[in-house]
């Protein structure tokens, strides 16, 4: 127990040092800010983009929310692993590992927020362009109407303006359509661009029905996407509950074997290795599930 007691003393010394040197600020907030500064410094460009947009949308977690998340992760990991090994040092190590996943989960959540924002903007872009074209009978004029209407935000707004510039510079809409289709490879974008290209090449006669059908396709897609989001959120909640219960199965094992018998078995190295394997596999299962939930937003 000497090593465990020494480890606890070191933790308390570090906490007291931080408290005395940063007593004007909340210690937890200071630690979170330091971690965030370090992560922002080395984070990939993609994270910085989605994180900034998440902040602009007002959906970024506050320091208090991150503090709660860190506390829950560390506390749950410490309690569960102590039930597995009855070793304080191992519990603290697992708690620190659990906290290290917080930035990665924040990245996944920001990507989800960003993906949903982009899809909503694409839905606005396609719907409004169709409505503007029905009035102007000109794809470029329709784009100008959408760009000036104030319904779009960056980066989609900047890309639409780039399409307008390319159309005037080239004298055709071909390259502009290809540019936008590559940036946003949604099938509603490709289908709409193909329709406008066909109308432009063959003339605008009898295009009203085609445009109306395209608008109905967009409306049906949007409806199915929002329905899918509700269903996925419900499934995600059940998935997390199931994942947590997998960790707590060790309590049933100890109940069936008896705590004393379990402690005797735990002294064998291969039993400890097996317990570590169970924790790693369960964690991998949860992280993979979270990655799938946050990355596959059901937009297509």
Image: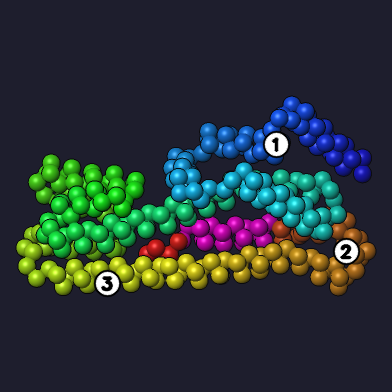
Task: List x then y, in percent, for residue 18.
Answer: 75, 31
Magenta stretch encompasses residue 284: yes
Where the N terminus falls, by quadrant? top right
Nearer the camera: disc 1 or disc 3: 1
- Residue at left 62%, top 34%? 34
Answer few, some or many: residues within 10 Å of disc 3's Cα (few below 14, many 20 plus, some between 14 and 19): few
Nearer to me, 212 or 295: 212
Which of disc 2 and disc 1 is earlier in sequence? 1
SS of the residue under disc 1: loop
Considering only vertical position in the picture, is 17 above or below 268? above
Question: Where does label 1 land, which residue?
Answer: 26
- Residue at left 86%, top 58%? 266
Task: List x then y, in percent, for residue 186.
Answer: 32, 60
Which region shows up in magenta? Answer: 280-296
Which of disc 3 and disc 1 is earlier in sequence? 1
**Quadrant of the image occupied by residue 103:** top right
- Residue at left 18%, top 55%? 142
SS of the residue under disc 3: helix
Nearer to me, 95 or 140: 140
Question: Where does label 3 land, which residue?
Answer: 216
Residue 161 seen in this snapshot: yes
Marks 1 and 2, how far apart in space? Answer: 42 Å
Nearer to me, 165 or 135: 135
Which of disc 2 and disc 3 is earlier in sequence? 3
The reply to whether discs 3 and 2 touch (Cβ–Cβ < 8 Å) is: no
Disc assigned to residue 258: none
The reply to whether discs 1 and 3 touch (Cβ–Cβ < 8 Å) is: no
Task: List x then y, in percent, for residue 232.
Answer: 51, 68
Question: Where does label 2 land, which residue?
Answer: 262
Magenta stretch encompasses residue 82: no
- Residue at left 92%, top 40%? 2
């Amino acid at each position: 127990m000497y090593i465990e007691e020494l480890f606890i003393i070191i933790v308390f010394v570090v906490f007291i040092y931080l408290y005395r040197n940063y007593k004007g600020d909340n210690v937890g907030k200071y630690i979170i800010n330091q971690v965030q500064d370090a992560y922002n410094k080395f984070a990939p460009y993609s994270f910085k983009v989605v994180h900034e947009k998440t902040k602009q949308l007002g959906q970024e977690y506050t320091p208090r929310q991150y503090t709660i998340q860190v506390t829950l992760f560390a506390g749950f990991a410490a309690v569960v692993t102590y039930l597995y090994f009855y070793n304080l040092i191992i519990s603290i190590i697992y708690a620190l590992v659990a906290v290290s996943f917080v930035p990665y989960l924040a990245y996944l959540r920001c990507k989800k927020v960003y993906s949903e924002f982009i899809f909503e903007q694409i839905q606005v872009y396609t719907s409004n362009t169709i409505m503007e074209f029905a009035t102007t009978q000109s794809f470029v004029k329709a784009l100008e109407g959408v760009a000036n209407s104030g319904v779009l935000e960056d980066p989609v707004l900047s890309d639409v303006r780039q399409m307008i510039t390319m159309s005037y510079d080239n004298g055709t809409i071909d390259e502009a359509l290809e540019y936008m289709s590559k940036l946003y490879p949604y099938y509603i974008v490709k289908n709409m661009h193909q329709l406008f290209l066909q109308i432009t090449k063959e003339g605008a006669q009898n295009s009203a029905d085609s445009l109306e059908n395209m608008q109905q396709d967009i409306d049906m897609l949007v409806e199915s996407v929002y329905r899918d989001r509700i269903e996925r959120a419900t499934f995600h909640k059940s998935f997390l509950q199931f994942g947590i219960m997998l960790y707590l199965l060790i309590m049933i094992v100890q109940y069936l074997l008896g705590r004393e018998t379990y402690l005797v078995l735990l002294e064998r190295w291969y039993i400890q290795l097996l317990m570590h394997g169970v924790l790693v596999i369960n964690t991998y299962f949860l992280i993979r599930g979270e990655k799938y939930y946050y990355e596959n937003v059901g937009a297509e």
